[in-house]
Image (tube, helix red, strand yellow):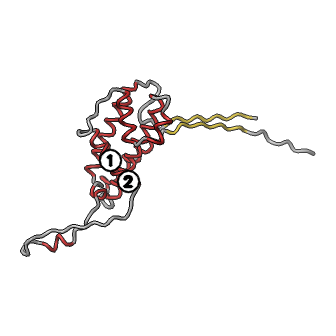
């Protein structure tokens, strides 16, 4: 007696991953966690800032091809700040580099680059104070690299506010009706009996 093999089910899945949205969401989660429990907040602020930097960079790579047919040329050779400049110029968006929100984004890219291309650096500081001052308190204060000093709640909040403002302006100016800002993507799954 032969046993009949059960029918097979074919499953097809598709998903669009909006990387910039996922990174943006992660940045917000880390900032929120730092506010709920201050223990270890320095690392949460650092993570929030890094994910925010990656998010705007990923957004520029998301929106770029929708504005420029030749985006693939820019993608690998132009810095994130250069990409922002190119997109803003094309969409006629004025973001002075010495004012918020553009200044904030510029600072974030500098921070991102210092970590992405990190190396061991010596830090020295010499100062003088009167012997009657609490000089021993100063002795225990840790010297910080500029990127370490940047990991604050204030900076994490400001970066998120200003990045959101920049991204919203770009998205609005691009007039994309089929692209929902900060959408985590779209999934479809089907099953059929074979």
Element type at mark 1: helix
Which residue is rendered at x = 38% and y = 30% of the image?
Answer: 171
Of residues 80 and 1, the one nearer the viewer is 80
Which residue is rendered at x = 59% and y = 36% of the image?
Answer: 14
Q: Position of residue 187 (x, y in %)?
A: 55, 36
Residue 94 placement, left or right of 84: left
The numbered dot on residue 108 is: 1
Q: Position of residue 91 (x, y in %)?
A: 36, 27
Image height check: is 26 above or below 129?
A: above
Residue 130 placement, left or right of 75: left
Res 39 quadrant in image:
bottom left
Q: Residues within 10 Å of mark 1 (few under 14, many from 20)?
A: many
Q: Residues within 10 Å of mark 2 (few under 14, many from 20)?
A: many
Q: Position of residue 86 (x, y in %)?
A: 38, 33
Is the C-beta separation of discs 1 and 2 under 8 Å?
Answer: no
> Which corner quadrant holds the C terminus?
top right
Of residues 54 and 90, the one nearer the viewer is 90
């Amino acid at each position: 007696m032969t046993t009949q093999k059960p029918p097979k089910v074919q499953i097809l899945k598709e998903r669009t991953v909006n990387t910039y949205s996922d990174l943006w969401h992660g940045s917000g989660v880390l900032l929120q966690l730092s506010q709920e429990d201050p223990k270890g907040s320095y690392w949460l602020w650092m993570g929030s800032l890094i994910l925010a930097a990656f998010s705007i960079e990923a957004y520029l790579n998301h929106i770029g091809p929708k504005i420029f047919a030749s985006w693939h040329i820019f993608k690998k050779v132009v810095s994130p700040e250069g990409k922002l400049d190119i997109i803003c110029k094309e969409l006629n968006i004025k973001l002075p580099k010495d004012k918020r929100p553009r200044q904030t984004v510029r600072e974030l890219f500098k921070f991102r680059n210092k970590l992405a291309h990190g190396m061991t650096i010596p830090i020295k500081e010499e100062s003088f104070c009167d012997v009657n001052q609490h000089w021993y308190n100063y002795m225990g204060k840790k010297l910080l690299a500029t990127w370490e000093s940047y990991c604050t709640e204030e900076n994490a909040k400001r970066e998120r506010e200003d990045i959101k403002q920049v991204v919203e302006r770009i998205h609005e100016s691009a007039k994309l009706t089929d692209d929902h800002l900060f959408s985590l993507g779209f999934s479809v799954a089907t099953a059929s009996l074979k």
